[in-house]
Image (cartoon, rainbow, N blue to C red):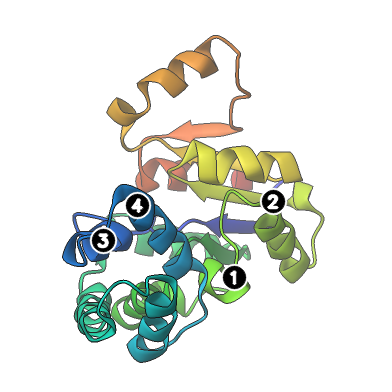
């Protein structure tokens, strides 16, 4: 069956950002412990704040032992950085243009917070303007690998899950939960050196294989064009 709806992850799939994740950067600046940094990461990716002050208030409430003024200062600084640091991965523009031209509806499913998504929209309107659906952790207030985020994506698309594809760079966050809901899956294995133990499990049939594996977006383009031409 030809693809009808294709969802993409954003970070490390369509775009890249800072050298570290927001939780790592903010956790370091606030001198948080590893456990605190993990809690912070979940909070900032699932809080619906669309301005730094609102998010800072929520973070300060979770970490009352930290200086709230310092928290707001660091969040405001990182907020601006995150809006500016977004960089498009080669092949994204062409892939979206060709898929859209073929009549495919497109969406994103992403663990993300507002400033990075805002930067994605502002810096790459050629991609973001072609999205039919956006399913974002900070708006839903839960994040991947929750199955609910994939069920919500299929609901938004008005399609049974088996008519939807998920494209992403993470097996744990993108491939596995999407497959469990019933999506078809295309894994962009752009960092195989980080997936050695997982690749062994896949080769030993200890985990189910995705429906496709490619190395980059240009290969993803070929993958989908072959299916559309068949």
Q: Secondary structure at mark 1?
A: loop
Per the image, the residue denoted by label 4 is 12
Per the image, the residue denoted by label 1 is 141
Q: CA distance from mark 3 to mark 1?
A: 20 Å
Per the image, the residue denoted by label 2 is 147
Q: Earlier in the sequence, mark 4 or mark 1?
A: 4
Q: Earlier in the sequence, mark 3 or mark 1?
A: 3
Mark 2–mark 3 contact, CB under 8 Å?
no
Q: CA distance from mark 2 to mark 3?
A: 28 Å
Q: Earlier in the sequence, mark 4 or mark 2?
A: 4
Q: CA distance from mark 2 to mark 1?
A: 13 Å
User: Foreground residue, 201 or 142?
Assistant: 142
Mark 1 packing: few (<14 Cα in 10 Å), some, or many (20+)?
Answer: some
Q: Quadrant of the C terminus?
A: top right
**Residue 55's x, y, as percent?**
40, 82
> Is 225 placed left or right of 92 in the picture?
right
Q: CA distance from mark 3 to mark 4?
A: 21 Å
Q: Secondary structure at mark 2?
A: helix
């Amino acid at each position: 069956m030809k693809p009808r709806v294709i969802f993409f992850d954003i970070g490390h799939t369509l775009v890249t950002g800072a050298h570290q994740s927001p939780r790592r950067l903010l956790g370091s600046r606030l001198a948080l412990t590893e456990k605190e940094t993990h809690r912070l990461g979940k909070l900032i990716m699932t809080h619906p704040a669309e301005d730094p002050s609102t998010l800072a208030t929520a973070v300060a409430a979770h970490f009352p032992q930290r200086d709230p003024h310092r928290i707001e200062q660091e969040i405001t600084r990182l907020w601006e950085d995150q809006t500016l640091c977004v960089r498009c991965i080669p092949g994204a523009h062409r892939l979206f243009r060709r898929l859209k031209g073929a009549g495919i509806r497109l969406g994103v499913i992403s663990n993300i917070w507002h400033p990075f998504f805002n930067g994605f929209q502002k810096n790459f309107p050629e991609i973001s303007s072609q999205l039919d659906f956006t399913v974002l952790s900070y708006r839903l207030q839960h994040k991947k690998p929750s199955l609910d985020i994939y069920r919500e994506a299929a609901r938004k698309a008005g399609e049974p899950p088996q008519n939807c594809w998920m494209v992403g760079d993470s097996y744990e966050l993108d491939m596995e939960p999407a497959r469990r809901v019933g999506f078809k899956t295309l894994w962009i294995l752009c960092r195989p050196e980080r997936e050695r133990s997982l690749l062994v499990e896949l080769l030993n049939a200890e985990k189910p294989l995705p429906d496709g594996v490619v190395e980059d977006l240009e290969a993803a383009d070929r993958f989908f064009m072959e299916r559309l031409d068949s």
